[in-house]
Amino acid sequence: MLGPPEDLKDKVILEIGSGAAQCSRWLAAQGAHPVALDLSHRQLQHALRIDGGAVPLVEADAGALPFADGSFDLACSAYGALPFVADPVRVLRDVHRVLRPGGRFVFSVTHPIRWAFPDEPGPEGLSVAASYFDRTPYVEQDDEGRAVYVEHHRTVGDRVRDIVAGGFRLVDLVEPQWPAWNTQEWGGWSPLRGNLIPGTAIFVCERS
Ligand SMILES: C[S@@+](CC[C@H](N)C(=O)[O-])C[C@H]1O[C@@H](n2cnc3c(N)ncnc32)[C@H](O)[C@@H]1O
């Protein structure tokens, strides 16, 4: 969705919410020049441990990118940053700023429809248990009541409006189907659910 692998060669690519930078390492293997950005020092330490610093790492907030305007050809994110910020338009505007005209930002999130279902791999994960329209964030707290994990729900329509408000044009919305070869269960992910409801939404955006 960023383009055919052969077109990635020599492209300067920003990965947002990179975690341990798996995507950036794949991009580097295609001949691209990725920069992996994450808020978490710990995640970036994992990246450093894995590749010894082969991919440049930046510890920063996706809503306050420490780069000059038009620094990147492309940007991407695999489930990174956007689901965890209360103001996704701020992130989108900043990604728009650091991209060159015509550059794409491709990002994935857990498919918004999943918000309505329990995060269970079996049949109990197939019955609607919450309102798709309820935007109350999911919050986990520590013993002192401090929020240690916050995830924000946006409907598909919210995401489209955020993308437009961020200055992008939405080129495609991809909802990958569960591949027949994958028989694995992991958390709420399973072939049973994957064959019936989408698990991931990938938004392909273009900077004007
Ligand atoms: C679900 S993980 C995805 C990691 C990686 N992209 C992957 O596919 O394994 C989400 C990542 O987003 C990062 N993140 C959350 N909020 C962020 C923010 N405001 N700015 C930058 N990164 C953020 C987290 O630290 C975490 O590494």
Image (cartoon, rainbow, N blue to C red):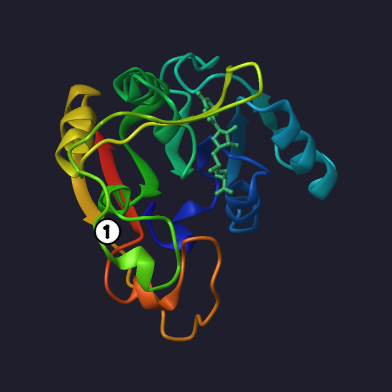
Picture quadrant where residue 73 is located? top left
Residue 168 visible in image: no
Q: Is mark 1 within 8 Å of ligand 1?
A: no
Left or right: residue 68 compared with residue 159? right
Q: Position of residue 59 (x, y in %)?
A: 66, 23
Residue at which label 1 appears: 174
**Residue 195, above or below 176:** below
Q: Position of residue 140 (x, y in %)?
A: 53, 31
Q: Regarding ligand 1, which quadrant of the image does it lie in? A: top right
The image quarter in which residue 135 lies? top left
- Image point (31%, 47%), residue name: 115
Say above or below: 94 vs 185.
above
In the rendered image of this protein, does residue 74 appear above or below residue 165?
Answer: below
Residue 53 or residue 16, whichever sits in front: 16
The kind of secondary structure element at disc 1 is strand
Measured from the top left, where is residue 112 in percent x and y?
28, 47
Mark 1 is on which residue type? Val
Q: Residue at x 79, y 35 (%)?
A: 45
Pick the residue in front: 143 or 193: 143
- Quick one: quadrant of the N terminus? bottom left
Residues packed near mark 1 inside 10 Å, few (<14), some (14 to 19) or many (20 plus): some
Residue closest to the eye, 168 or 31: 168
Q: Residue at x 38, y 46 (%)?
A: 109
Quadrant placement of the C terminus: top left
Residue at image coords 37%, 31%: 152
Q: With 56 as the anchor, is 86 left or right in this view?
A: left
Q: Position of residue 78 (x, y in %)?
A: 48, 47
Q: Is residue 155 left or right of residue 176?
A: left
Up/down of 169 relative to 165, above or below: below
